């Protein structure tokens, strides 16, 4: 992979990282830990219906799941940027052959070529 291609992949990784950080920031701003009473603005002593509480808990759990998934993907992006800086980006971690550019364009954080990935998934 030449320097111009490597630079383009690094730019794409940085842009993806910025987008993920923005999404995670928005999640934090929504304050996933707010209760139904807090988010509704109600200051009554009466409890909410159990279905409302269940829905609120499910939505918070779903938001937490998505934030966790995005955080893991952010970690993969950081590792890919480290490989760019180390000069190993685009090389298969198993067989050390170059990963095709088409695969890297589809999966920016790919660490294996297709044959090695298929072997790893069948184990």
Image (spheres, rainbow, N blue to C red):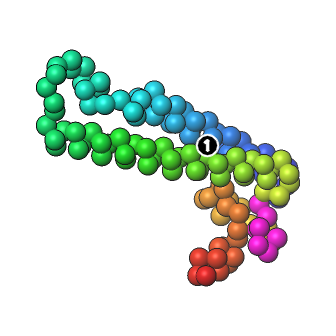
Q: How many marks on residues?
A: 1
**One can see residue 116 in this view:** yes
**In the picture, which quadrant includes the C terminus?**
bottom right
Q: In the rendered image of this protein, does residue 17 appear above or below residue 3? A: above
Mark 1 sits on what residue? 16
Q: Position of residue 64 (x, y in %)?
A: 43, 44
Q: In this view, does 57 lie to the left or right of 101?
A: left
**In the picture, which quadrant includes the N terminus?**
bottom right
Name the one closer to the observer, 62 or 107. Answer: 62
Q: Is residue 18 left or right of residue 44?
A: right
**One can see residue 100 in this view:** no
- Quarter occupied by residue 113: bottom right
Secondary structure under the numbered disc 1 in the rendered image:
helix
Q: In the rendered image of this protein, does residue 8 appear above or below residue 26? A: below
Magenta region: 90-96
Q: Where is residue 60 in the image (x, y as percent from the top left)?
A: 35, 41
- Quarter occupied by residue 90: bottom right
Magenta-colored stretch includes residue 95: yes
Q: Which residue is rendered at x = 22% and y = 39% of the image?
A: 53
Q: Position of residue 71 (x, y in %)?
A: 56, 45
Q: In the rendered image of this protein, does residue 96 appear above or below residue 20? A: below
Q: Which residue is rendered at x = 50% and y = 47% of the image?
A: 68
Q: In the rendered image of this protein, does residue 97 appear above or below residue 123? A: above
């Amino acid at each position: 992979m030449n320097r111009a291609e490597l630079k383009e992949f690094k730019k794409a990784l940085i842009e993806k990282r910025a987008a993920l950080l923005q999404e995670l920031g928005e999640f934090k701003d929504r304050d996933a830990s707010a209760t139904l009473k807090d988010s509704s603005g109600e200051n009554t002593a009466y409890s909410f219906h159990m279905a409302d509480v269940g829905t609120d808990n499910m939505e918070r759990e779903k938001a937490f799941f998505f934030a966790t998934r995005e955080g893991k993907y952010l970690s993969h992006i950081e590792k890919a940027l480290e490989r760019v800086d180390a000069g190993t980006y685009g090389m298969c971690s198993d067989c050390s052959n170059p990963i095709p550019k088409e695969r890297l364009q589809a999966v920016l954080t790919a660490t294996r070529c297709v044959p090695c990935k298929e072997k790893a998934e069948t184990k």
